[in-house]
Structure formats: C-alpha cells, structure tokens
Amino acid sequence: MIDTVLNDELPMSAIVIPKSYPDGHIIDWHHHDFSQLVFAYSGVMIVETYENLWVIPPQRAVWIPAGVLHKVSMHGQAKMRNFYVRPNCDRQLPEQSCVLNVSTLMRELLLHLASVEFSESCREEIERLIKVTLDQLKSAHQVTFYIPIATDPRLASVCNALLNDPANSRSLSEWAAIINISSRSLSRLYRNELGLSFVEYRHQVRLLEALKQLAKGKPVTTVAMEVGFSSLSAFNRLFKRNFGTTPGHFFMVI
C-alpha cells in the first residue's frame, strides 16, 4: 500500500507517515521500493536485517535503503515516524543501513511533516521542508550500537544463546569448551566475523535487552540485575558510555 502511494500517487519526493504499535508487535520480513528512515518517537524498536540487528531507542532512527529486507519488533508503546524517500531522490544519502542520532530540528521536521495534509497549494512549502529534512539526514551523526549477526555455525550457536539469555555468565573459555574449539579460536571468530570481542558483544546484547525492559517501565535496578550486570553502577557506566545519559533519564527526553 505504501509503495503504491509513494510511487504512483504522491506528487512529492518524500512523505512522513506516523504509526503506533503495542508492545510485542512484529512487522514481519518485507522490503520497499523506496528508502525509509524509521524514527523512534517513543518506545524501542528492533530492526533486523540478514546482517545486523539495529536498536532504535527514542530520538534515534535507522536508515534502510530501498530493497533491503528487514523485520521490525516493538518494545513498549512504540510510536514511529516513517520518512519514505523516493529512490535516487538524493545521491548523497547513505548507501548502507545505519543508526542515526536525530537532531532537535530533524525531530520537529519529521513530526510536522507527519501532520501536514497535502494540497496543491502547499506543494512547494512541503518540498522545501523535505529538502531541509534530507539535509539534516545527510549530516546526522551515525552511531554504532547494533548487534551483528553471526554466520559461522559455531559462533552463531553462542550468539543465539546469549541473545536468548543475556544474563548468561559463562566465560569465553566455557563457551569454547561447549562448541569444542579453543578459547583463542572463539575469540578470533568474534573479532574477525563480528568486529567485537566476546565481552563487547555480550555487553551489546545486555544493553539491547535492557532497552526493551526499560521501555516497558521496569525499574532500573531490576533491569540491571535481570540482564546480568553485577552492580547498578556498572550498568549505569556502560549505559551512559553508549547512550550519553543514565538509564533513569533515558526515556524522559521525549
């Protein structure tokens, strides 16, 4: 439906469509004939491709180029603003999927464009706003919080176990023994295939689960313990290093 509206009926270069979903809602695997910026206005969204698992907490967005297969799951009461852009609208837009920080200006532009009803008389005004939004998108700071997907079967078995149980405290050597390889070999698999150490990957997984639970309103201390951190201070330090604020303030920025 969206593809039809954008390609056949929309007389503009882009459109913003607001959507709201309940906790646990899943949009199954699909792709579009246009590029898409998924902005998390509230809640947490997980966008999965065959290569990565992108985490979109509030005030961030994920850029998905045209034709990329993806799946979206919602955590907390998720509100998104989808910025759909015609293919080849601007050749300076990112060529790969990435997570972006959304500036205050870009946020307000997306919210405004989502509320505007098109008419021929306001076409030029809307196109100017779209151009400014695209400029903001191109200059947005890319952030690195994502979960890479393992393809090696041995590594994938460990990664999947951690994704299913982030609080799992087995060491690298214990996991290596389970999959019958050396600790050095498992460490090398993490570095070579995922670009992360075992500990870094586990931290990312734990933060991912923490974001899901915080979006549902769980207390910070409860979340920290449930996802496997040994202390609240350790959780706060890692959270602030990745997201620029403490978990207690993170969902208060909206």
Image (cartoon, rainbow, N blue to C red):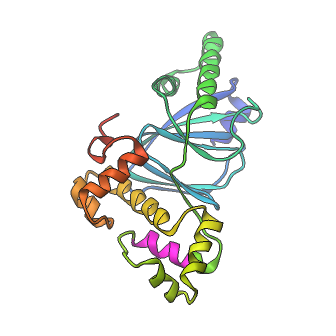
Position of the C terminus by quadrant: top left
Q: Name the residue rendered at 58%, 69% in the picture.
A: 190
Residue 160 among those drawn in magenta: yes
- Whole-percent x, y for residue 33 in the image: 72, 44
Magenta-highlighted residues: 156-165
Asked whether the viewer can see residue 69, the reply is yes
Foreground residue, 239 or 115?
Answer: 239
Residue 92 percent across, percent down from the top left:
73, 31
Q: Quadrant of residue 166?
A: bottom left
Q: Nearer the viewer, residue 50 or 202?
A: 202
- Our reading of the magenta stretch's main secondary structure is helix
* Nearer to us in this view, 232 or 219: 232
Measured along the vertical axis of the image, is residue 179 above or below residue 201?
Answer: below
The answer to whether residue 203 is above or below residue 246 is below
Identity of the residue drawn at 28% across and 60% down: 224
Seen in the picture, residue 7 relative to 177 is either above or below; the reply is above
Q: Quadrant of the N terminus?
A: top right
- Looking at the picture, how far across and down is residue 162, in whole percent? 45, 72
User: For this rendering, which residue is in front, 46 or 151?
Assistant: 151
Residue 43 appears in the rendering = no
In the rendered structure, does residue 118 fall within the stretch colored magenta?
Answer: no
- The structure residue drawn at horizontal position 61% and vertical position 69%, both measured from the top left corner, is 150
**Residue at screen point 56% across, 74% down:** 187
- State which quadrant residue 10 falls in: top right
Q: Residue furthest top?
A: 121
